[in-house]
Image (cartoon, helix red, strand yellow):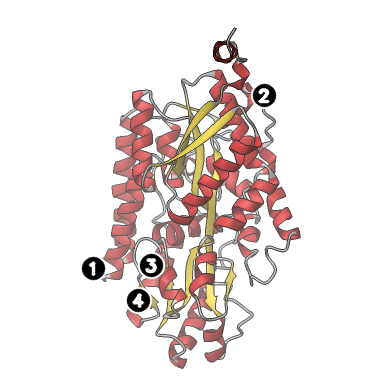
């Protein structure tokens, strides 16, 4: 037998175990975050010979969600789907294999108790079983300019705890001329409406914020948010508050020194640290101390990883292996350090703390502390269909308040009415 024929025979009769199972992974992370997704996949691929995860960028969060739903309906979805938090209710109604079932069927070790409760509850069903794997998570926090505080005669090592204390600080900052803007915010719907409701354990919607049924109705137009949006409106009129847009425009105004205080995502810390030319600190989200039991815990923003139905056993095994790999404390801790997102597990947080990640970053552990407050009925997140539409219309109604064309009560009432119409359409569609 010639060497050429021998080589061909060996190739034909090579063990099936040498074959690599390829796993498509659709995501919506661009720039530096996208590089970290590719790095994560490469590290997993190098850790074992049987599976190869292939990341594919599918556009923005909204574009990725639309592509995922279309692919699931057509029966040609990839193996792994990154879906952002607002799409959870919609994707959970699609052809997905729940995380708890995937891990059980593939005999992969999986303990839901290792995940930070405020994170895991956001992606669980009504019985607390996890439907998807937390991926890039952040929570709403408060940043303040320590140098501006000093110039205004405020204690630079003491952040305002309550919203009345934020107002007192804002007035001093304004009177001293320390900055041209006292306060701004990012992601107004998520922070000023959703997170503030959870922080005070106030209902956002009936049926336990939608976890107990698709017939939920929005109910956030009550005392807490009418009070808070009224306060923000008064700050807008007096120049204490500047509206910076629907996404993260406030982060840039804070990092440039224009605004002395900002409520933003915890993931903003790393970006602010790169551009700010002043000392700053992170602190917990302010609250109203006359609400019984407050604060409770904030909710997460970000995305989780889902898998579709209809895949082969070997493919499901590979997805489960990848999920187990990403759940490891060392991998989680490294992901958190490189991306600025939260460590999703308690063990990863403890590892990062022991490795000194939180040293020299004033207040950065605030994010973990506020996620570890007492959980409560309405502090576990939202499960509402077509929620991307609802967030957009909440933004529209808040902008009417900032323009002074609607009162806070009128805007919140209208947001609830319009949002409930979206929920009823979703309910009639039979997606849940």
Query: Do the residues under discs 1 and 4 have CB atoms within 8 angstroms?
Result: no
Q: Please, is residue 157 above or below residue 274 in the view?
A: below
Residue neighbourhood size for the residue with mark 4, other residues' Cα within 10 Å, grouped as few (<14), some (14–19), many (≥20): some
Secondary structure under tag 4 reads helix
How far apart marks 2 and 4 lie (CA) works out to 56 Å
Which residue was labeled with disc 3?
Answer: 249
Q: Residue at x 56, y 41 (%)?
A: 42
Crowd around label 2: few <14 · some 14–19 · many ≥20 (10 Å):
few
The answer to whether the residues at label 3 and label 4 have Cβ atoms under 8 Å apart is: no
Q: Residue at x 46, y 62 (%)?
A: 224
Residue 138 numbered mark, or none: none
Pair 1/4: label in front: 4
Q: Disc 2 on helix, strand or loop? A: loop
Q: Quadrant of residue 394?
A: bottom left
Q: Is residue 36 above or below residue 97?
A: below
On the image, numbered disc 2 is attached to which residue? 107
C-alpha separation, residue under disc 1 versus residue under disc 2: 58 Å
Which residue occupies the foreground of this view, 416 or 371?
371
Q: Position of residue 118 (x, y in %)?
A: 60, 49
- Residue under pointer 1: 405
Which tag, 2 or 3, sits closer to the chain's start? 2
Q: Which residue is mark 4?
A: 236
**Does dot 1 land on a helix, a strand or a loop?**
loop
Q: Does any portion of residue 128 appear in the rendered image?
A: no
What percent of the width, then of the height, locates residue 78?
Answer: 44, 30
Residue drawn at x 69%, y 54% is 349
Q: CA distance from mark 2 to mark 3?
A: 45 Å
Q: Earlier in the sequence, mark 1 or mark 4?
A: 4
Q: CA distance from mark 3 to mark 4?
A: 16 Å
């Amino acid at each position: 037998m010639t060497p050429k024929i021998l080589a061909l025979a060996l190739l034909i009769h090579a063990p099936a175990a040498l074959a690599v199972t390829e796993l498509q992974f659709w995501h919506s992370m661009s720039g530096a975050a996208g590089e970290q997704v590719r790095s994560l996949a490469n590290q997993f691929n190098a850790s074992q010979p049987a599976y190869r995860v292939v990341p594919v960028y599918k556009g923005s969060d909204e574009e990725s969600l639309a592509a995922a739903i279309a692919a699931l309906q057509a029966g040609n979805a990839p193996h792994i789907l990154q879906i952002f938090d607002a799409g959870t209710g919609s994707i959970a109604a699609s052809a997905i294999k729940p995380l708890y079932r995937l891990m059980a069927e593939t005999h992969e070790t999986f303990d839901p108790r290792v995940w930070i409760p405020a994170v895991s509850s956001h992606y669980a069903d009504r019985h607390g079983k996890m439907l998807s794997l937390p991926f890039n998570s952040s929570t709403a926090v408060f940043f303040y300019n320590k140098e501006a505080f000093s110039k205004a005669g405020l204690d630079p090592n003491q952040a305002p705890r309550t919203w009345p204390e934020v107002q007192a600080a804002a007035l001093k900052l304004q009177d001293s001329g320390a900055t041209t803007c006292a306060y701004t915010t990012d992601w107004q719907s998520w922070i000023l409406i959703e997170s503030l409701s959870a922080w005070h354990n106030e209902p956002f919607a009936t049926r336990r914020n939608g976890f107990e049924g698709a017939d939920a109705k929005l109910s956030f137009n009550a005392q807490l948010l009418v009070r808070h949006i009224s306060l923000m409106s008064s700050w807008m009129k007096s120049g204490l508050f500047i509206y910076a847009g629907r996404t993260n425009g406030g982060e840039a105004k804070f990092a440039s020194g224009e605004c002395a205080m900002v409520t933003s995502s915890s993931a903003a810390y790393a970006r602010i640290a790169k551009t700010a030319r002043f000392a700053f600190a992170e602190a917990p989200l302010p609250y109203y101390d006359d609400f019984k039991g407050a604060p409770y815990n904030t909710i997460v923003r970000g995305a989780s990883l889902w898998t579709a139905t209809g895949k082969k056993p070997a493919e499901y095994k590979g997805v489960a292996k990848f999920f187990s790999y990403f759940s490891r404390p060392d991998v989680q801790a490294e992901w958190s350090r490189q991306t600025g997102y939260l460590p999703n597990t308690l063990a990863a947080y403890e590892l990062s703390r022991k490795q000194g990640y939180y040293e020299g970053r004033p207040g950065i552990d605030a994010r973990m502390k506020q996620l570890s407050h007492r959980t409560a009925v309405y502090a576990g997140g939202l499960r509402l269909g077509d929620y991307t539409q609802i967030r957009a219309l909440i933004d529209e109604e808040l902008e009417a308040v900032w323009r002074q064309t609607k009162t806070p009560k009128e805007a919140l009432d209208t947001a609830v009415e319009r949002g409930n119409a979206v929920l009823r359409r979703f309910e009639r569609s039979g997606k849940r």
